[in-house]
Amino acid sequence: MAVALLLVVGGYLLGTFPTAVVVGGRTGHDPTTEGSGNPGATNVYRTSGRRAGALVLVGDLVKGALAAGIGWWAGGHLLGVACGAAAVAGHVLPVTRRLRGGKGVATFGGATLVLFPVVGVVAGVAWAVTVKLSGRASVASLVAAVGIPLGAAAVGAPGLEVALLAGTGAVVVVRHADNIARLARGDEQPTVAGRS
């Protein structure tokens, strides 16, 4: 139990790594004060360009993948899910930045790719297609956040794992509350480089 707890805490701390701030800083931009103010791949894409946004996306995917993979290797699949969820929590609510983090989509996706590869690939394709059709990463992110736990349930994941994934997906959805409000009003900005 002590080892499991340490691994979950480690997953959380891994999730707090400020990928967007580091990458944005190297391009002369601070995503926490520019654009939407969100330290995530979409805002870095808008403020720093396509390459920087892609680097943040990959970095945040890796955070979730590493946390989930280490947990799975050290203590089984359920612990992998718990560590992946902890990494998302660390990304969203980092103690190192006064609980002001990103929205957790890429970190959630990285954990899913390790734990449920088919679900992760399908979620990634659904995300990309939804961005293409809607022009808005927020819509695609909501689709992925809801779809991942549903996909895990569809492939027969145990109930506790599905519950952890559902809780993690709910956190991602809540972090998109402002986007949801703008979508409802019809003034959510498209995901285009250079726009805030």
Image (tube, grey):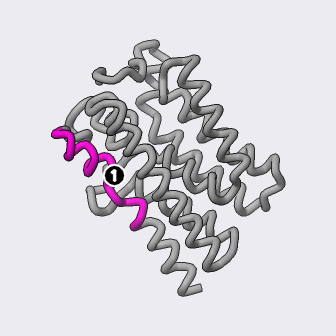
Q: Residue furthest bottom?
A: 2
First to last magenta residue range: 13-28
- Secondary structure found at label 1: helix
In the displayed structure, 127 sits above or below 170; it is above
Residue 8 pos. (x, y %): 51, 72
Report the number of discs.
Answer: 1
Residue beneath the point at 78% across and 57% down: 157
Give coordinates of residue 175: x percent, y percent: 45, 41
Quarter occupied by the C terminus = top left
Residue displayed at 38% across by 55% down: 93
Task: Single out the residue that lies furthest toward the front.
Answer: 51
Q: Main secondary structure of the magenta part?
A: helix
According to the image, label 1 marks what residue? Answer: 19
Q: Is residue 71 left or right of residue 185?
A: right
Which is nearer the eye, 121 or 33? 121
The amino acid type of the residue labelled 1 equals: Thr
Q: Tell me: 14 left or right of 29.
A: right
Picture residue at 45% right of the left edge, 73% below the top: 10
Q: Residue furthest top?
A: 186
Image quadrant where residue 30 sits: top left
Q: Residues within 10 Å of mark 1 (few under 14, many from 20)?
A: many
What x and y, as percent, mark residue 186?
46, 12
Point 37% across, 42% down: residue? 40
Q: Quadrant of the N terminus?
A: bottom right
Q: Is residue 50 left or right of residue 160?
A: left
Residue 105 magenta-highlighted = no
